[in-house]
Amino acid sequence: MFPQKLKDLLEGVGYKCLQGDDQVLVNDVVYDSRRVRPGCVFVCLIGSAVDSHQYAAQAVEAGAAAVVASRQLELAKGTLVLVEDTRKAMAYMSAALFGHPAAKLKTVGITGTKGKTTTACMIKTILEKGGIKTGVIGTLGVIIGDTTYPTNNTTPESYDVQKYLNQMVEEGCQCAVMEASSLGLKWHRTDGLVFDYGVFTNFSPDHIGENEHSCLEEYAACKGLLFQSCKLGLVNIDDPACETILKDHTCELETFGFSNPQAQLKGSNEGLIYRPGYLGAHFDVSGAMKLSVDVDIPGKFSAYNAIAAIAVCRHFPVSEQNILDGLNEVKVKGRVEPVKVPGNYTLLIDYAHNAVSMENILTTLREYQPHRLVCMFGAGGNRAKSRRYEMGEVSGRLADLTVITEDNSRFENVMDIIQDIQTGMAKTQGKSIVIPNRRDAIRYCIENAQEHDIVVLAGKGHEDYQEIKGVKRHFDEREIVADILKELGMEE
C-alpha cells in the first residue's frame, strides 16, 4: 500500500478537521492501538468493553500521523478528524485504502439466523465446479484457495474485510461470499461495498442481550440492512419474517421457497437419503430452473440452504451439472460433517453447543430412523449453568445413548460441569455414560458403534482446540478419529 492523502480516504464520509491537515499522507488504517505504526491513521472505536479514544494520545506518540474520532480530544500533535461514527468511517476508509477490491469481484452477502455457513460453502463448491475461484468470509474463517485464515467474528472488522477481499483479488478469485451477521451489519463492518447479491435464509430469536441486540425488532432491522446495500436480494419467501426483513429494501428482489406458491424458484418433493456414511436430502426445483437435486448434508433444512445456493448460482456462468455435482459433494467443516469409518454406521462431527442447536441436530438425525442415535458432548466452562442443564435434558430426551464428556472446561473442574449436565439428564429416561476424557469418549463411541447407528460428536465442530485451565491445546476430532482407528487396526 502506498501513502495516500487522508482526505482521499475519507471520500464519502462527512468529517471536520479539528487539528492539523487533512492532506497529510497516511500509509495504513489502524484500529488497535497495539498495532500503531509511524504514518498510520488511528481510528477510535467504541466497543462493549473498551473505548479506544483513551488511546489516541498514545497512538500519536507511537507515530500515528492522524486520528479519527467521534469526539473532541486533546492531542499534542498530529491531525485530528471528527466524524459522527468512527466504525462507519473506518469501513469507507478501508475500502479506499485497498482500492475498493469488492468492485473487482462478484460479491454475495448472506444473512439469516441459521444456514449462513452451509449456504456459503454450497455456493463456493458450485462456483468452483464451474471454474470460478471463490473466497469465503464467515464463521469458519476466511477461506482462499486451500488456506483458511482464522477470524474472531463471523463478519470481521471492516478493515479486515477489505484486506481479505483485496487478497482474494490478488490471488485470482472472481467471487467473494460473505456471511453478513446482524452484528456485522449493525456495526458497519460491511459498509463501503455494495453486494451484487444479498441472501436471506431464515429468521428466529437469537442474539438478544447485552452487547448484542436490544430486542427482536432491532435484530430483524439489522438483518434488513443487507437489502439496502445490495443490487439483487434473493429471499426465502416462506419465512414469516421475510416481509419485516425487507421493510426498507432498496434492491431488486427474487424469491425462493417450498411452501409459498409465489416463489420464483420453487422446491418440492423433499425427501431424505440414508445409507451408512451418507445422510442427505433430495428435492426437485421448478420455476426459474428445473432440477432434481441430491444434497450431501442431512435434514430438510439442507434443502432450504441448497435452494438458496441455487438462487445465487443460477446468475453465474455455471452449468446445471456444476450445480448438481456441487450440492452432491459439498462438505461443511463441523456442520453435521461425516467422517469416514469402517463399519456399517455413520459418524458425524457437529458444532451443536447449546440446547437449541442440539435439539435441531438430534431431531434432524432422528428422522433418518437409525438403529440407535448416540450423542457425545460436553459443555463449556465459565458459562451459564442453565445451558448445561438444558443440553443434558435435550440429549436425554432425543438420543438413545448420551456419552457425557469434556469440552472447553476453561477454568472449571470438568466433573462439576458433567454433574450439571447429569442434572438435566435426570429429568429424562435417557441412558448415559460418563467418560471425562474426550479422546477416550470418542474411542468408546467407535468401539461400541452398532450396525446402522448414527453417532454424533457434538460441540467442537470446526474448532481444532480444547481450552483447559487457560491453555489452548490442539485437538482436532478428525485427527483423533483417524488415530483411534489406526490404534484399533481399523483404518481403511
Image (cartoon, grey):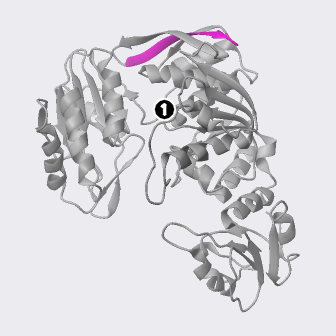
- Front residue (pair 191, 411): 191
Q: Would you call the spot at circle 1 few (<14 residues within 10 Å), some (14-19), or many (20 or more)?
A: many
The quarter of the rendered structure image containing the N terminus is bottom right
Quadrant position of residue 460: top left
Q: Position of residue 375 (x, y in %)?
A: 24, 32
Q: Position of residue 388 (x, y in %)?
A: 23, 47
User: Would you say residue 90 sits in the magenta stretch?
Assistant: no
| In the rendered image, the vertical position of residue 5 relative to residue 462, given as above or below | below
**Residue reaching furthest to the bottom:** 76
Q: Which residues are magenta?
A: 278-289
Q: Position of residue 325 (x, y in %)?
A: 58, 16
Quadrant position of residue 300: top left
> SS of the residue at dot 1?
loop
Q: From the viewer's perspective, is 412 left or right of 459?
A: left
Number of numbered discs on residues = 1
Give the prevailing secondary structure in the magenta stretch: strand
Tell me which residue sits at (72%, 42%) in the image: 228
- Front residue (pair 390, 307): 390
In this view of the protein, can residue 246 be seen by the observer? yes
- Front residue (pair 206, 155): 206
Which amino acid type corresponds to the residue marked 1 in the rendered image? Val
Which residue is identified by label 1?
A: 332
Q: Position of residue 316 (x, y in %)?
A: 74, 24
Tell me which residue sits at (29%, 35%) in the image: 457
Tell me which residue sits at (66%, 63%) in the image: 87
- Front residue (pair 430, 14): 14
The quarter of the rendered structure image containing the C terminus is top left
In this view of the protein, can residue 5 be seen by the observer? no
| In the rendered image, the vertical position of residue 117 relative to residue 417, given as above or below | above
